[in-house]
Image: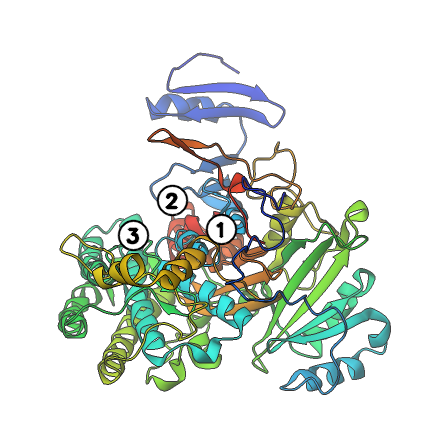
Amino acid sequence: MTTFTDPYSSSRETTEGTVFSVTGGDWNELVTEIGATKEERIVVNMGPQHPSTHGVLRLVLELEGETVTEVRCGIGYLHTGIEKNIEYRSWTQGVTFVTRMDYLSPLFNETAYCLATEKLLGITNDVPERASAIRVLMMELNRISSHMVALGTGALELGAITPMFFAFRERERVLDIFEMISGLRMNMAYIRPGGVQQDLPAGATQKIRETVKEMRKAFKDNSTLLIGNSIWMKRTEGIGYLDLAGCTTLGITGPVLRSTGLPWDLRKTQPYCGYENYDFDVVTTDTCDVYGRFLIRMNELEQSLRIIEQACDKIDKLAGAPVMVEDKKIAWPAQLAMGGDGLGNSLNHIREIMGTSMESLIHHFKLVTEGFRVPAGQVYAAVESPRGELGAHIVSDGGTRPYRMHFREPSFNNLQSTAAMCEGSMVADIIGAVASIDPVMGGVDR
Amino acid sequence: MSDHGMFGAHGTGDTSGYGGLVRTPAATGSSERPYGSYFDDVADDLERAYPGFSDAIERVVVDRGELTLHVKREKLVEVSKILRDSLKFEMCMGVSGIHYPEQTGRELHAVYPLLSITNNRRIRLEVSVPDSDAHIPSVVEVWAGNNWHERETFDMFGIIFDGHPGLTRILMPDDWQGHPQRKDYALGGISVEYKGATVPSPDERRSYR
């Protein structure tokens, strides 16, 4: 074989055969050189730095021509050791860690963590109704923003730019609401064991209702653009096929499972946070393909809007009700009040602990530095995140810190189906299949 | 992991008596019948479908509305197959390891949350093994989706899942030394200086346990 050194496509010999590193340059020269090997089988590394792999996902593809014969996923590039770190923080501090796992659905991570912590504390039924309604409201808003990224980036990766503009425009509205409520657009650590960090600001439900109306209209931009669009259909119909048997054996949940026609949604089947009191439908399709999953996400947006409206009604009805458990040994003592610059401490609370009551100061100090103790035991609490079942398995030894916390991440689990969906398909269809799983690497690697 | 942070706090570290909270030890014995909820049905069905029940199941624990079956590791795959086929626990939601260094002879635990879509039920299997012989049979042949989960638990705890199709590290680099989520693996970190004072790394900070 000819050996020449090209700075853009150098080759080297390994035990597996000749390995080419392509970094640009003249494609024809590379093709000539590869042609000289007389072997059809090519192994291509797609990612971890690749715009279409949803972050730092590495796909090792074995190709026969354009057909994919084998797919292996390489993950771990975004591993941050959150599960280990949390063992060195108080139960309340844990929220600020889990919110950073799956960064597109922070409120689901927080809710799963808090539901598990509350189960360990035995205060599940003491969480005020208003707090649960706010949680539901925030989660459904978050579902919209997450689905928007899934749809927008998924379309972008398949070559359509306009849907991404529409999707990110709507996501922006949701992030504005998050900012109004919690002061932060992402990773807000808003949901806390026992309730939520602070009450909604004045006029929040009114603003949300207006936004819901605008979004309901604006969602049509994307649905009219994509549903039935022949190019979109050709790229998505029959692609990434995974049927019910495949889903159950691989533990797949979320839109991928619902695209097989099974209406499995934890909000309906195993309700939490009072979801049983909301009127909404579980969206399914029976095509088992990328298009079906796309339709599910599109239609779930409307269901989320319905839930948001009902949650707003509930929150208005419960005006003035507490948003944190009454137990002062658990409820976070600090009182926050939104200042002109975003977050801030309530001056009344500062006056009380610094000027009036030494006991209040001691209480505040103890709870903030030491935290509360959680009776020993283990629990598993699951919520329906935009990607499927998000489960928190938490073990306590009776101390002020979690003894062990493990998140059953839907992205991590569902990414296993890449091989089942893609082997035997074309290279270009991998992009659509992976996008339909909607993995978030922050959640996969934790 | 040391319980004593930079102030050398022993016990609860609570010198004020203000906390007033008592640590309750984890339940160790078996729960008594009736278990409540659908747990009696699950136990009965499993006993009927699996004659070796009393031999394979070490303990049945019902705590906080959740059922845990402690299974002997030799019987794990058998029990799993029965649970999947006869009791319709179609899905296994992964495996989570726990390291209890003080439980001599059963330091490493593996916990499998199971989900039955047919019956809308959840139970949990728990297997414990000694650190010196950290082998658990793999359930990948029963629930293929546990493949990555077992790799993660191997990566983080060093539990070897026998029969796994390719037990390699998944989150840490391939040449990594040690298993990070074991309790004898230090968190690490560096102290940070801020305005002349030093903030110690998280595992060196005052701890209240």
- Sequence-wise first label, 1 or 2: 2
Image location of residue A130, percent across then percent down: 32, 78
The amino acid type of the residue labelled 2 equals Gly
Q: Earlier in the sequence, mark 1 or mark 3?
A: 1
Q: Which residue is mark 3?
A: A153
Helix, strand or loop under label 3:
helix
Q: Which residue is mark 1?
A: A89
Q: CA distance from mark 3 to mark 2?
A: 11 Å
Calculate the distance from the C-alpha at mark 1 to the C-alpha at mark 2: 28 Å
* Residue on which the image places disc 2: A55
Q: Residues within 10 Å of mark 1 (few under 14, many from 20)?
A: many
Does A427 sit above or below residue A284? above
- The residue under label 1 is which amino acid type? Arg
Front of the two marks 1 and 2: 1
**Tag 2's secondary structure?**
loop
Residue at image point 61% right, 33% down: B176
Marked residue nearer the N-terminal end (3 or 2)? 2
Residue found 71% across the figure and 49% down from its top: B159
Relative to A29, does residue B140 appear above or below in the rendering? below
Which chain is mark 3 on? A
Q: Is residue A408 visible?
A: yes
